[in-house]
């Protein structure tokens, strides 16, 4: 019996990997433009980190984590999201004491959740995100949103919708929390068991429920915007004005909430169209209390994360063709044993000069070698036979124009550097 890939995972094959690499390169480019620095954290962490950093009442912690005991009896968990690990590293490495504040971090890496696999949702998925830690300035909320929109636009997406809301400060959020309890309590027995538990634990998470989304009480739930105090309203107005000033359009959705207790003020999602329904591509928001919850000082943060798998579906839905270079610079065709021997150092020198080059390793006939060059989309084919070897020359063909030239073997590198299309 053959061993198969675990359910909910996927192989990213060589003919697909260039797309992933391009997306990751674009993310790193935008990180650089906005002065965010990449960080890499362990794939597994202490289980307690996610219990405290994500929340015991969340579906992630209760139902979706991959948790195991190591040989020392310690409970470890494959990371289900990036923020908790970033904040743990921020605290453990005392980044709050660095002279450059806020600390602006970006990350790219695999995450793991035991979910029902479906299109755009796998049990191992790749997440790209940023976290800005240390500033209470509403302009950094706007910056984080602008970074996300810039990345999506750079990748060619156009059918995007930015959805915005505010959860206010702790005072506003507490008032809203009490209003939600009062609103849902009379009919809570009609809701799913998860929502019944959430009523007292975290009533905002009821608004996220997929099971009871059509319940009449959902449609008449109070709006957080009615419970914002003057400071919270002013903060939200500043974020909106900065987005307006940058020309970033948005819509306000009072039901957009983040269920975790440490979220406050700005929350946002970016939605894409073309999946049969409007689909969330990215989620983020401002959070206070998470750093102190994980043993650090009272330091605020704001960030977002998105899954590359979902992004790929959006690119496909909009028929976006990424500008990926799948060509090689030169393919060497060698005819005869001496030419085959000589092709080895020639190829090595081309590669050392920074050129992408290849040759035949399957003892193909000349016609087969040219077919291989076509399959590899070689821009140039350099042909070396016994006669050319004696004269110390090589035939070079431009596969785009069909033009051919004979040049000295030691001039091949310079010739290609001059004529290649970059």
Image (spheres, grey):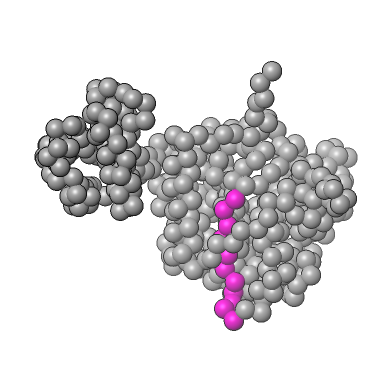
Classified by dominant secondary structure, the portion drawn in magenta counts as strand
Q: Nearer the viewer, residue 25 or 398?
A: 398
Instruction: Check if residue 122 falls in the magenta segment.
Output: no
**Viewer-nearest residue: 275 or 28:** 28
The range drawn in magenta is 99-109
Residue positioned 46% across, 46% down in the render:
21
Query: Residue 395, can we see it?
Result: no
Position in image of residue 165 (x %, y %): 62, 58
* Closer-to-camera residue (202/409): 409
Q: What residue sits 54% from the left and 50% below the top?
A: 270
Image coords of residue 264 (percent x, y): 69, 64
Residue at 65% of width from left, 52% of height from top?
A: 256
Which quadrant of the structure image shows residue 387?
top left
Name the residue: 28% across, 27% down: 369
The reply to whether residue 211 is in sight is yes
Furthest residue in direction bottom, as rendered: 99
In the image, residue 295 above or below residue 396: below
Q: How many marks?
A: 0
Name the side, left or right, on which 407 lies relative to 285: left
- Residue 66: horizontal and vertical position, in percent? 76, 43
Residue 138 is left or right of residue 330, and the answer is right
Magenta stretch encompasses residue 101: yes
Residue 278 in percent (x, y) is at: 55, 40
Give the answer, above or below, for where 147 lies relative to 333: below
Give the image quarter of residue 320.
top left
Q: Residue furthest top?
A: 1
Q: Quadrant of the N terminus?
A: top right
């Amino acid at each position: 019996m053959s061993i198969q890939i675990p359910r909910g995972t996927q192989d990213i094959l060589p003919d697909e990997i260039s797309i992933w690499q391009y997306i990751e390169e674009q993310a790193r480019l935008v990180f650089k433009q906005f002065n965010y620095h990449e960080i890499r954290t362990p794939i597994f962490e202490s289980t307690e980190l996610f219990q405290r950093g994500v929340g015991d009442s969340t579906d992630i912690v209760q139902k979706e984590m991959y948790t195991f005991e190591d040989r020392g009896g310690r409970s470890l968990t494959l990371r289900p999201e990036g923020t908790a690990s970033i904040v743990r590293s921020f605290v453990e490495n005392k980044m709050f004491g660095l002279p450059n504040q806020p600390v602006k971090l970006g990350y790219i890496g695999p995450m793991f959740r035991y979910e029902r696999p479906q299109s755009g949702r796998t049990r191992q998925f790749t997440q790209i995100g940023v976290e800005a830690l240390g500033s209470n300035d509403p302009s950094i909320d706007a910056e984080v949103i602008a970074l996300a929109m810039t990345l999506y636009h750079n990748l060619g997406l156009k059918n995007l919708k930015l959805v915005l809301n505010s959860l206010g400060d702790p005072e506003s959020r507490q008032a809203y929390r009490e209003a939600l309890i009062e609103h849902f309590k009379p009919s809570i027995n009609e809701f799913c068991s998860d929502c019944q538990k959430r009523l007292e634990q975290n009533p905002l998470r009821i608004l996220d429920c997929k099971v009871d989304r059509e319940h009449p009480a959902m449609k008449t739930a109070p709006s957080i915007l009615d419970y914002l105090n003057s400071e919270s309203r002013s903060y939200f107005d500043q974020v909106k004005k900065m987005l307006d000033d940058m020309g970033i359009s948005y819509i306000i959705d009072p039901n957009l909430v983040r269920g975790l207790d440490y979220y406050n003020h700005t929350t946002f999602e970016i939605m894409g169209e073309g999946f049969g329904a409007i689909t969330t591509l990215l989620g983020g928001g401002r959070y206070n209390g998470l750093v102190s919850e994980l043993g650090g000082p009272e330091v605020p943060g704001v960030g977002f994360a998105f899954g590359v798998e979902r992004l790929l579906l959006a690119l496909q839905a909009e028929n976006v063709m990424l500008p990926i270079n799948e060509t090689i610079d030169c393919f060497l065709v060698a005819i005869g044993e001496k030419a085959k021997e000589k092709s080895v150092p020639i190829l090595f020198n081309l590669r050392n000069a920074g050129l992408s080059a290849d040759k035949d390793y399957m003892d193909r006939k000349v016609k087969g070698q040219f077919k291989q060059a076509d399959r590899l989309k070689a821009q140039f084919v350099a042909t070396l036979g016994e006669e050319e070897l004696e004269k110390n020359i090589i035939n070079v063909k431009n596969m785009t124009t069909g033009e051919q030239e004979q040049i000295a073997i030691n001039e091949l590198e310079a010739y290609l550097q001059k004529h290649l299309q970059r």
